[in-house]
């Protein structure tokens, strides 16, 4: 049971209503849900968070398949039910295999067929374990993805870690699918 009431547009301030409408224009659902049903209460956080989410959804330098891999890793690390339920089907559409997704769900290392996925997985796994990466890991990632790609990977992991915190603290249930355990 969510720890926050469902958003009713008419009960929002004028600025919140504007953000509400902007958020829904960029999403496939007709009601505000998930982390933005929480964040909208603080527009100065919600607005830049939405810009970052949309950046990773629409304009990343990294392949969207790799972005979804990072997102799944971050939301699995946080056991963020709602975000997993939204991003599992997106990850499939972007080209991750069901076997890779299932391994991440089970907290196991996937048997990667693609080198870029293996490299991102290792980089983000090390980041989560150590809150940094070794010089060797940094150089491998930079050689493969460029400086911008490394910055994107770290920023995406951090953003979705924050989203996981918001979802978990406010007990936002999954939209669909099998719950994470």
Image (cartoon, grey):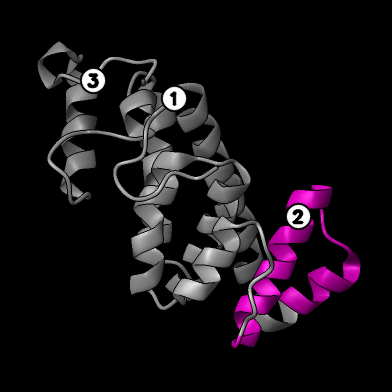
**Disc on res. 13:** none
- Mark 2 → mark 1, Cα distance in angstroms: 26 Å
User: Along the horizontal axis of the image, is 114 left or right of 22?
Assistant: right
Q: In this view, does 111 lie above or below 56?
A: below
Magenta segment range?
A: 113-141
Question: In the rendered view of the protein, which quadrant contains the N terminus?
Answer: top left
Pointer 3 local density, CA inside 10 Å: few below 14, some 14–19, many at least 20: few
Q: Does the segment drawn in magenta span residue 81? A: no
Which quadrant of the view contains residue 32? top left
Specify whether residue 145 is in view. no
Q: Is residue 19 above or below residue 132?
A: above
Pointer 1 local density, CA inside 10 Å: few below 14, some 14–19, many at least 20: some
Pointer 2 local density, CA inside 10 Å: few below 14, some 14–19, many at least 20: some
**Disc on res. 6:** 3
The residue that appears at 34% across and 33% down in the rendered structure is 36
**Residue 121 horizontal/vertical position (percent):** 67, 68
For mark 1, what is the residue? 171
């Amino acid at each position: 049971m969510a720890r926050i009431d469902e958003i009713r547009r008419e009960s929002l301030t004028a600025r919140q209503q504007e953000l509400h409408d902007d958020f829904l224009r960029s999403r496939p659902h007709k009601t505000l849900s998930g982390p933005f049903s929480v964040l909208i209460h603080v527009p100065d956080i919600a607005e830049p968070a939405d810009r970052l989410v949309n950046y990773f959804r629409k304009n990343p330098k990294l392949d969207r398949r790799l972005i979804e891999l990072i997102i799944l890793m971050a939301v699995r690390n946080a056991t963020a039910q709602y975000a997993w339920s939204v991003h599992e089907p997106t990850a499939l559409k972007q080209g991750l295999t069901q076997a890779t997704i299932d391994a991440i769900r089970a907290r196991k290392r996937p048997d990667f067929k693609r080198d870029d996925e293996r490299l991102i997985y290792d980089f983000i796994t090390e980041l989560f374990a150590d809150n940094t990466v070794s010089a060797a890991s940094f150089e491998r990632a930079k050689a493969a993805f460029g400086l911008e790609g490394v910055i994107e990977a770290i920023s995406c992991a951090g953003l979705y870690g924050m989203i996981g915190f918001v979802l978990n603290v406010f007990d936002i249930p999954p939209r669909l699918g099998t719950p994470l355990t």
